[in-house]
């Protein structure tokens, strides 16, 4: 399987590898971005020789409700978070005829609340969605 690349993970790592990690508790939390609810799609775990952030968990969210994910206990806490969405036409410039996705880095403000409110940190990466 060494020839298989996880393009989404590589895009996530390109955003986050130079950022300071934080502790994000996933269990029993509601998540918001700009006052709008976002939904946990899953957790990306850095595994294998292709990961620059080996063993680091990244929570991946969407603005669209997806199927609920059961988070295993060992992945209860993540060090980073990102928003996953379909690329806009202008973002697909290098790959105009491909199905592209975008991951955007999410920052966690320094405040306590009953829910978690993220802000976009201004970073994003586009990747070709190879199925």
Image (cartoon, grey):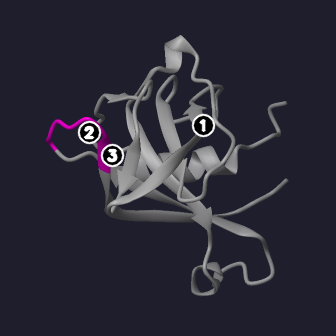
User: Which image quarter holds the N terminus?
Assistant: top right
C-alpha distance separating marks 2 and 1: 21 Å
- Residue highlighted by disc 3: 18
C-alpha distance separating marks 3 and 1: 22 Å
Residue 20 has which mark?
2
The residue under the point 38% across, 31% down is 79
Residue 97, located in which quarter of the rendered image? bottom right
Q: Please state the extent of the stretch shown in magenta in the rendering.
A: 110-117
The residue carrying pointer 3 sits among few (fewer than 14), some (14 to 19) or many (20 or more) residues within 10 Å by Cα, namely few
Q: Position of residue 108 (x, y in %)?
A: 27, 45
Residue 42 has which mark?
1
Q: Is residue 33 visible?
A: yes
The residue carrying pointer 1 sits among few (fewer than 14), some (14 to 19) or many (20 or more) residues within 10 Å by Cα, namely some
**From what the image shows, is residue 64 above or below residue 73?**
below
Magenta region, main secondary structure: loop
The residue carrying pointer 2 sits among few (fewer than 14), some (14 to 19) or many (20 or more) residues within 10 Å by Cα, namely few
What is the secondary structure assignment of the residue under circle 3?
loop
Question: Are dots 2 and 1 in contact, CB under 8 Å?
Answer: no
The residue under the point 57% across, 23% down is 71
**From what the image shows, is residue 10 above or below residue 126?**
above
**Mark closer to the observer (3, 2):** 2
**Mark closer to the observer (3, 1):** 1
Q: Position of residue 96 (x, y in %)?
A: 74, 84
Q: Nearer the viewer, residue 69 or 14?
A: 69
């Amino acid at each position: 399987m060494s020839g298989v690349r996880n393009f989404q993970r590589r895009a996530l790592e390109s955003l986050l590898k130079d950022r300071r990690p934080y502790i994000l508790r996933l269990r029993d939390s509601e998540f918001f971005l700009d006052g709008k609810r976002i939904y946990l799609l899953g957790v990306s775990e850095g595994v294998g020789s292709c990961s620059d952030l080996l063993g680091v968990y990244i929570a991946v969210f969407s603005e669209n409700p997806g199927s609920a994910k059961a988070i295993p206990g060992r992945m209860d806490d993540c060090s980073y978070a990102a928003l996953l969405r379909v690329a806009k036409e202008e973002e697909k410039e290098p790959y105009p005829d491909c199905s592209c996705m975008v991951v955007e880095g999410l920052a966690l403000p320094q405040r306590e609340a009953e829910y978690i409110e993220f802000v976009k940190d201004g970073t994003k990466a586009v990747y070709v969605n190879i199925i």
